Amino acid sequence: GIRVLVQGCWGFASTSVVTEASLAATARLAADIAKANKLVLKEPVQLAPHQGFGEVSWKTPLVQSAFEVPVKQKADLLLAANAAA
């Protein structure tokens, strides 16, 4: 999902299509929703000031790619978690 803050109003939109065109259209939709929300806005949203971290990168140490785990193993894990809940 994409969330935006436009003129003190939140807008949210999501898509399951991960292409440049779809993401751009979804961002525009989120902005349009934020602008529409302004009609019922009582008080603009103001984010707390926060010092940035600059440019950073982080990499998760992968033990096994999720795409290499057999579907049966994933399903068994979910069923076991569900049974324990």
Image (spheres, grey):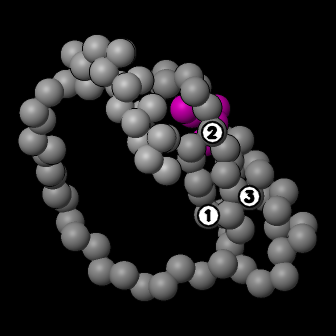
Above or below, 61 against 48 in this view is above
Task: Give yes or no for contact between labels 1 and 3 (Cβ–Cβ under 8 Å).
Answer: yes
Q: Amino acid at mark 1?
A: Leu
Q: Which of disc 3 and disc 1 is earlier in sequence? A: 1
Mark 1 or mark 2: which is in front?
2
* Mark 2 crowd level (few <14, some 14–19, many ≥20, 10 Å Cα): some
- Please state the horizontal and vertical placement of residue 1, each as a whole percent of the image: 56, 43
Q: Which of disc 3 and disc 2 is earlier in sequence? A: 2
Residue drawn at 59 percent across, 54 percent down? 3
Give the image quarter of residue 4: bottom right
Span colored in magenta: 23-27
- Please state the horizontal and vertical placement of residue 30, each as a whole percent of the image: 68, 47
Judge by depth and name the residue closer to the eye, 15 or 79. 79
In screen coordinates, is 39 left or right of 48? right
Q: Amino acid at mark 3?
A: Ala
Mark 2, residue position: 14
Mark 2 or mark 3: which is in front?
2
Magenta span main SS = helix
Judge by depth and name the residue closer to the eye, 56 or 16. 16
Q: Amino acid at mark 2?
A: Ser
Mark 3, residue position: 34
Give the image quarter of residue 80: top left
